[in-house]
Image (spheres, coloured by chain):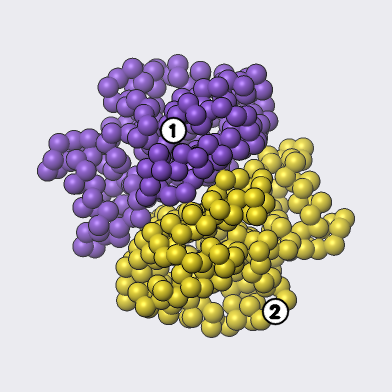
Chain colours: A yellow, B purple
Amino acid sequence: MARYQLYYWPSIQGRGEFIRLAFEDAGVPYVDVARLSPPAGGVPALMRLLRGQPGMRAPFAPPFLKVGRLVIAQTANILQYLAPRLGLVGRSEAERLFAHQLQLTIADVVAEVHDTHHPISGGLYYEEQRAEARLRARHFTAERLPKYLGYFEKLLGKRRGLVGRKFSYVDLSMFQLLAGLEYAFPRGFARRTRSIPGLLALRDAVARRPRVAAYLASPRRLPFSEEGIFRHYPELDEGG
Amino acid sequence: MARYQLYYWPSIQGRGEFIRLAFEDAGVPYVDVARLSPPAGGVPALMRLLRGQPGMRAPFAPPFLKVGRLVIAQTANILQYLAPRLGLVGRSEAERLFAHQLQLTIADVVAEVHDTHHPISGGLYYEEQRAEARLRARHFTAERLPKYLGYFEKLLGKRRGLVGRKFSYVDLSMFQLLAGLEYAFPRGFARRTRSIPGLLALRDAVARRPRVAAYLASPRRLPFSEEGIFRHYPELDEGG
């Protein structure tokens, strides 16, 4: 069994994808537990840890990572733990803090994207909150999307990575964020592309990294879908 | 000038309060920059850093902390940086990761609380999204609030702190979260108190800590208000 065991929903990219990308780019073996067959894998294996095991503190939600007896949850926290071990962040404390700060800002965007299709409750179907979703999505694509993209573009400037001189896990996460935004809001995203040349170049450079390219072409890369966080509903991609 | 300079909106508790509480409990001096007078302080001083200064990477949003030339943003990231320096977390990596994981889960609750009064857009007034806010708040108090509180109560069990044997910054943040929830949703919160005896005891123990008690009684502690994140609108406190 590989040292790193990732627990996340087996049928979507979701928040787990940010972690999968880090492992794949580093070429470090990991087990995507819920995508294995039961009884060792599958959703039941995920649920067992989520309910809590003796001597192990349950996380609130997936994704979580098991490394020996350690269980780590919260996407950005998992990445912060993994990055030095996978060679995906620099050594200095200042650089690691800044990388984590950016990753948490990306997490904020992701949460806002989720709420474009679930503005009232995660416990209701999209179809039950479609009217509110239209309103929220319109504000997201008109106000929040340009604000976030503008921030990251300015930060990146002429550099080749968001954090420092070294390629980092934040660059991988930015690739995933941009891919998701383009999937969910193709029209809203297209309207912004002229103002984010640096981010688009970064995205394309990430997609060309050999292990990332191999991963994206493999069956391990799940497709975007309307079960995930980035969902394409044409009626949510009108404003902006 | 004190070593630690906190930048946050001067008139609300908001996310900055989680950081103020850590400094106050530790008895470590800090400057709450935007609460000083201009030109050295005030909101203009905050805005200057937010726009970016030469050689300094701008954060996306307050709060942020300036320590020498280092600028750190994202509440949980700031706390993770400060906690070992303030004696508010244990030494092991496992304990720090777990503390941060819980802090990020608290941050998720805070973001959901914000969206109960701003479910459509942060750029609109509450009054412009009141109908949607009622719906979202009803789901929050009926589904999310008990789920989060139940998780933290079970995790705490019979222990005296959420993280480990040692009191931690996460306990301070839990105090603030519970105080905010009770302020915003007095009826919804009252309905849950019987099922969270451990959390309430923790909250009361935090409030009795001498430096916390002195802070809460001082003018440095801003009141909760309808400008902050935890807002009391009676119409949002009906369901559950």
Residue at x-position 27% and y-position 36%: B10
Rendering coords of residue B96 (x, y %): 53, 43
Disc 2: which chain? A
Which chain contains the residue that carries disc 1? Answer: B
Q: Secondary structure at mark 2?
A: loop
| Above or below, A79 relative to B110 | below
Q: Residues within 10 Å of mark 2 (few under 14, many from 20)?
A: few
- What's the CA distance linking mark 1 and mark 2? 46 Å
Viewed as shown, does residue B175 lie left or right of B156?
left
Q: Which residue is mark 2?
A: A218
Q: Residues within 10 Å of mark 1 (few under 14, many from 20)?
A: many
Residue in view at x 62 percent, y 21 percent:
B191
Q: Is residue B104 visible?
A: yes
Three-letter amino acid code of the residue under disc 1: Phe
Whether residue B13 sits left or right of residue A37 in the image: it is left
> A119 above or below B22?
below
Mark nearest the camera among 1 and 2 is 1
Q: Which quarter shows the N terminus of chain B?
A: top left
Q: Please, is residue A114 above or below residue A121 in the view?
A: below
Q: Which residue position is annotated with label 1?
A: B230
- The residue closer to the viewer here, A21 or B12, is B12
Secondary structure type for disc 1: loop
Q: Amino acid at mark 2?
A: Ser
Q: Residue at x 65, y 77 (%)?
A: A215
Q: Name the outermost residue toward the right.
A: A39
Please name the residue shown 56% across and 39% down the image. Answer: B135
| Side of B231 relative to B178 (left or right) | left
Q: Depth check: A198 or A142 in front?
A: A142
Picture quarter with the C terminus of chain B: top right
Which residue is outermost to the left?
B39
